[in-house]
Image (cartoon, helix red, strand yellow):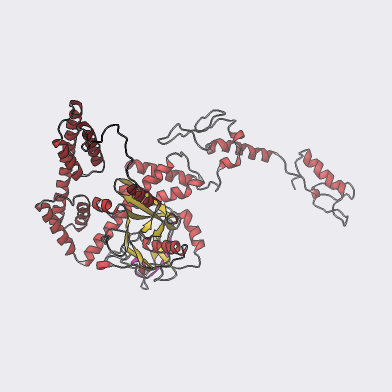
Amino acid sequence: MQGDRRQIQTAVLGSADSDDPLMLPLEAIELDAFRHLHESDTFWCGLLLGGCGGRLTTKLYTDRACHFAHHPDPDGQPHECRRRSRGVASADHLYVKSAAAAWLRGRGEQARFGFTRPDGAPVGSVVDIQFKDRGLRVHLDGVVAPVWDDGSEPVLGVSVPVDRDTLIGRWYVHRIRLDSEGTGRRVKIGTEAFARPTEWFGLDDCMMTERGLSTPAVERIIESRRTPPPSRWSPGKAKKVPEPDARAQGLLRRLLYARRIDSVVLVTQVCGEIADLTGVSTEILGQLEAAVRNACVWLEEQAEVRRKLFAGLGEAVADQRAGRVRRLLVRVNATASHGRTEAEEAIVSRATDYFAGLDSQTRQAVEAEAATERAAAEAAGRVRTLLKGLRRHDAYAYEFRDQVMELLGAAALAGDHVTAGQARDVALWKERFAAGRSLPPYPLHSRVGRRYWIARSCPRCHAEQGKDCVLVEGTDTGERRKYPHDERVQLILDERKAKQKQTPRAWRVDEVTCPDCGQGYNTPCESPAGPHRSRVELAKENSRLRKPPPKR
């Protein structure tokens, strides 16, 4: 049987049962420093990572990502390990435990941590945090369904779906994500509410209250719920029923909102209310009819998408494609749980029974594939974010080193999830990174004052004297650069270096003949007090006159 060739990016320190995780740098330029830092440590395929407990070593490559590897078996054959998750996110549950323990210690609290496996879930899917009379259950993937009315508050990974009814009824839910930083992972907590974007915070911005885990966004959401809308002054008696045109405007706004959040139920409901509306003006009636026509077209498109979704799920069950069944079943439960027909319910029931009847080995393989797919999707999102931050730069600098290294690692993990345009941008930054590895750890512009480089033109962007440099690549081409191009500064540094070479070095005292005692080249004066003063003055005078020192 051929061994699993997926690259191992995470390990634990010290022993097989350790809970101290670390991540290997992907680039060879970083691995030497990593090895030096951990030269007295041992790396293990940890049991808490779902590993075999074997010892690992580091593998350095210049043409692909560096990674951990098992030591060969005693018979010299490659070691076989059934570890299901090996990417940069495979130790996230250990990083969550470490970060949460440090966070609680800083607040004078202690907690108990557990990596429970409900219904045989893979280790690391769930992290239980219990302290005092409260607790949190962190769902890093969607294997274990969250329970909302239990003693522990669910915190969902970015790939765990949550339906709209839950968001509306609970006001908000918390999410968790981990971002790579060097050879570690940093925990971020997000707060998601209905029709609101997820807001992300560091652990230091979070706290535990009587309601449970709280972030600055929670306070704003609760305050907005408690604060009544401002009353409007009316010169006449308030009407219980709005005027037809005013009500029509409100329905148009609700229809726009329903389309924005992709709610088929709400769009259908608002269209029904518009159909029952009477007494509106001709102008408003035209707007309503146009809006309803567009909404009906949209509903037909959504119905077709739904039909294809259920048809695909039925075909996947018939073809016994376990991985596709799982993906489509998750999508159906997240986006098409309302108003199912008997035929749709039958398809979902067959899919659920089929997946529940899979043997453990097949299910583990499917879950491993799903975990890899989720990791790739998350990495693709990280690629988009990093490229967005780097797009205002048209050259590599040492200060971008961490972002570029993370970009290359995320792009390698994302694979086919990266678009062709993103792949071109990644390749460009990889080329810039390779060419700029020899750059010093300080920016060139910090060595030359503005009054010097602004006095000359730039050979790269052709900015004239007295003008700032501008971007010459990317979507922001032509916008002013925060700092000058290195080529503009390098000209000045090269001139200074050339001038230093042309200037003779200072004379040493023993390179001149002493006028007092007559001692010559490289011979000390006979005086016990050191060189005679006349010899010292003569060496200084030769240096002042820039005479070249003797070559012997």
Q: Residue at x 48, y 67 (%)?
A: 41
In this rendering, the answer to whether 222 lies above or below 392 is: below
The percent coordinates of residue 137 (x first, y second) are 33, 63
The percent coordinates of residue 236 (x first, y second) are 27, 32
The percent coordinates of residue 304 (x first, y second) are 15, 43
In this rendering, the answer to whether 365 lies above or below 434 is: below
The percent coordinates of residue 100 (x first, y second) are 41, 62
Visible in this render: residue 285?
A: yes
Provide the residue span drawn in magenta. 49-59
Camera-side residue: 493 or 62? 493
Camera-side residue: 264 or 225? 225
Visible in this render: residue 88?
A: no
Image-quadrant location for residue 161: bottom left
Is 544 on the left or on the right of 331, as rendered?
A: right
In this rendering, the answer to whether 391 lies above or below 206 is: above
Image-quadrant location for residue 47: bottom left
Is 61 on the left or on the right of 302, as rendered?
A: right
Q: Extreme top residue here?
A: 282
In this rendering, the answer to whether 150 lies above or below 193 is: below
Indicate the quadrant containing the N terminus: top left, top right, bottom left or bottom right: bottom left
Camera-side residue: 310 or 409? 310
Count numbered badges in the picture: 0
Q: Residue at x 31, y 49 (%)?
A: 193
Q: Extreme right residue here?
A: 516
